[in-house]
Amino acid sequence: MRIAIVTPYTLLNLGLKHLLQKYFEVTPMLYNDTQRMLDDSPEQFDAYILFADTFVAYSDFFLPRKSKTMLLTPNREKMPETVSPTLCIYQTEEAILEKLELFIEQLDKQAEALPHDLSPRETEVLKLVARGLMNKEIADRLNISINTVLSHRKNLTAKLGIKTVSGLSFYAMMNGYISNIDNK
């Protein structure tokens, strides 16, 4: 599991990375800048850990992924968990580990519940179809043949049961594969 830790605080990032690597089977990636993470193919991540202000500032991206996002808070008091699970950064190591464990268990349950297991290439094709690219444009962008694009689209139709471009676009948006931020 790949988790993006997105905060401007290097020491906080390193501390969370250490805990995640030591106690869980995850690969944390550190980002001091949200835009850099978004430019670095953000769909490669299974989850995100960030502050609420970042969540709000980039809500087009994070809102569809709220179930895969943990919010950080500097407040010792419990923050309402209406959007995402929260983690107070000033808690004891044991309390932080407990919260991280619950979050990772939640992610594992979500992954098991996903009915459609798309390959990474099918996911790429789905994103490009949803953005309105034609088969030739997709083939050129991914450096594959048109027949390979058609094969991936056939697999998408079979796995998802969706035959139209508008249906695939809607599915991609509702499941967090694309968002308004992708078109900017």
Image (cartoon, rainbow, N blue to C red):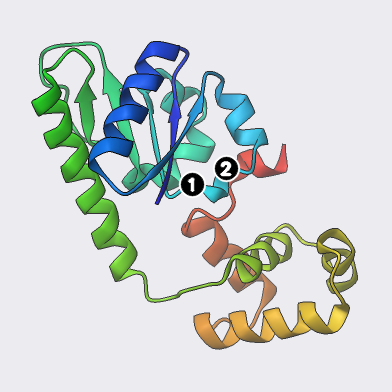
Q: Quadrant of residue 103?
A: top left
Residue at the (23%, 17%) spot, across then down = 89
Q: Quadrant of residue 13?
A: top left
Residue 139, position as x, y percentages in the image? 85, 69
164 displayed left or right of 75: right
Residue 171 against residue 66 in the figure, above or below? below
Front position in the image: 160 or 124: 124
Q: Are marks 1 and 2 in contact (CB under 8 Å)?
A: yes
Image quarter (top left, top right, bottom left or bottom right) of the C terminus: top right
Residue 78 against residue 82 in the figure, above or below? above
Q: Residues within 10 Å of mark 2 (few under 14, many from 20)?
A: some
Residue 129 against residue 5 in the figure, above or below? below
Classify mark 2: helix, strand or loop: helix
Please say whether residue 12 is visible from this viewpoint.
yes
- Res. 42 mark: 2
Residue 51 against residue 179 in the figure, above or below? above
Classify mark 1: helix, strand or loop: loop
Front position in the image: 94 or 122: 94
User: CA separation, marks 1 and 2?
Assistant: 6 Å
Please say whether residue 84 is visible from this viewpoint.
no
- Res. 45 mark: 1
Residue type at mark 1 is: Phe
Q: Quadrant of residue 49?
A: top left
Residue at the (16%, 27%) spot, across then down = 96
Q: Residues within 10 Å of mark 1 (few under 14, many from 20)?
A: some
Residue 98, position as x, y percentages in the image? 12, 36
Residue at the (52%, 18%) spot, across then down = 32
- Res. 110 mark: none
Residue type at mark 2 is: Pro
Residue 82, position as x, y percentages in the image? 22, 35
18 displayed left or right of 44: left
